[in-house]
Image: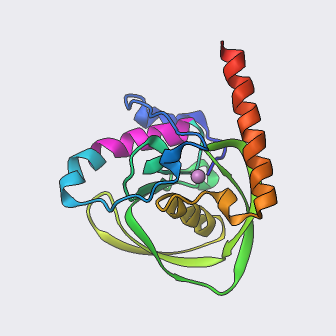
C-alpha cells in the first residue's frame, strides 16, 4: 500500500540499494510465491534493508517480495503511526483467523501507482509469521493494519487489491493505469 513518508525515515537505509517495483499488469505480480526456507536466510537478510529502503522511498506502508521481482512469501509493513517507525517483517505469513465483521478502507498499491479504491475486508485478523530474528509471532490486527497486512499477504498469491472489486471497476482502474504509464513513458523519451 502507499502513503506519504517523512524523509528522515530514509536515513537508516541510505546505503541500501533500491529495488525496482513491478507495475501491473506485470506477470510477476500474478505468480503464487513459494515459502521462504532455511536456505534462503542470507537472501532474506540482504533483502530486508533493501525492501525497507524501497518502501520508505516510494513512499509506501507495505511491500511484498513479488513486487520487487522475488516470488517468495515475505512482506514488510510499517504504518509509521505518528511518523514513528513500527516495522513488521513477515516471513511466511498466514491469516489464521478473521472476524465476521468487515470494514472498508481506501487502498492503493505501489504496483498500481496513483490508483485508489475502497476495499472491504475482514475488520480484524490474526496473522502468524516468522520475524526477521527467526521468531514465530502472532499478531492480532484491526483498522488500517489489518487491511494492510491482508493486502500484502494477498500479493503472495498473485492477488491485487483491484481483484476484490467488480470487473467493471477493476478494468476501469487497470485501463487508467495503462494510459498513465504510457504517458509517463512518452514523457521520459
Ligand atoms: Ni500492493
80 and 55: which is toward the camera: 55
Q: Position of residue 27 (x, y in %)?
A: 52, 46
Left or right: where does residue 106 sit relative to residue 134?
right
Is 85 drawn above or below residue 125 in the view shown? above
Residue located 76% across and 61% down the image = 167
Residue furthest bottom in the image: 100
Residue 54 among magenta residues: yes
* Residue at x-position 42% and y-position 36%: 12
Is residue 113 a member of the stretch shown in magenta? no
Q: Could you say which is closer to the camera, residue 91 or residue 141?
A: 91
Number of marks in picture: 0
Residue 18 appears left or right of 102: left
Residue 87 appears anywhere in the view: no
120 relative position to 69: left or right: right
Asked where in the image residue 36 lies, by quadrant, the reply is: bottom left
Q: Quadrant of the C terminus?
A: top right
Whether residue 178 is situated above or below residue 73 in the rendered picture: above
Q: Nearer the viewer, residue 126 or 167?
A: 167
Residue 3 on image: x %, y %: 66, 46
Q: Nearer the viewer, residue 188 or 11?
A: 188
Q: Which residues are magenta?
A: 45-57
Q: Quadrant of residue 101?
A: bottom right
Q: Is residue 74 visible?
A: yes
Q: Is residue 184 above or below residue 94?
A: above
Q: Name the spot of residue 45 as percent of width and height, x first.
A: 28, 47
161 w.r.t. 183: above or below: below
Q: Main secondary structure of the magenta part?
A: helix
Amino acid at each position: 500500500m502507499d502513503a506519504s513518508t517523512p524523509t528522515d525515515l530514509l536515513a537508516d537505509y541510505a546505503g541500501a540499494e533500491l529495488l525496482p517495483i513491478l507495475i501491473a499488469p506485470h506477470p510477476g505480480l500474478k505468480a503464487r510465491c513459494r515459502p521462504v526456507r532455511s536456505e534462503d536466510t542470507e537472501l532474506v537478510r540482504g533483502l530486508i534493508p533493501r525492501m525497507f529502503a524501497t518502501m520508505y522511498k516510494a513512499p509506501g506502508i507495505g511491500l511484498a517480495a513479488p513486487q520487487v521481482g522475488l516470488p517468495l512469501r515475505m512482506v514488510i509493513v510499517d504504518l509509521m503511526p505518528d511518523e514513528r517507525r513500527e516495522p513488521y517483517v513477515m516471513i511466511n505469513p498466514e491469516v489464521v483467523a478473521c472476524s465476521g465483521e468487515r470494514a472498508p478502507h481506501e487502498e492503493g498499491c505501489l504496483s498500481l501507482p496513483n490508483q485508489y479504491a475502497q476495499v472491504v475486508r475482514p475488520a480484524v485478523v490474526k496473522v502468524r509469521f516468522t520475524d526477521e530474528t527467526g521468531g514465530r509471532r502472532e499478531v492480532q490486527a484491526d483498522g488500517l493494519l489489518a487491511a494492510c497486512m491482508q493486502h500484502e499477504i494477498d500479493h503472495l498469491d498473485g492477488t491485487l487489491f483491484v481483484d476484490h472489486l467488480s470487473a467493471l471497476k477493476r478494468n476501469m482502474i487497470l485501463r487508467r493505469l495503462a494510459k498513465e504509464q504510457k504517458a509517463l513513458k512518452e514523457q521520459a523519451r
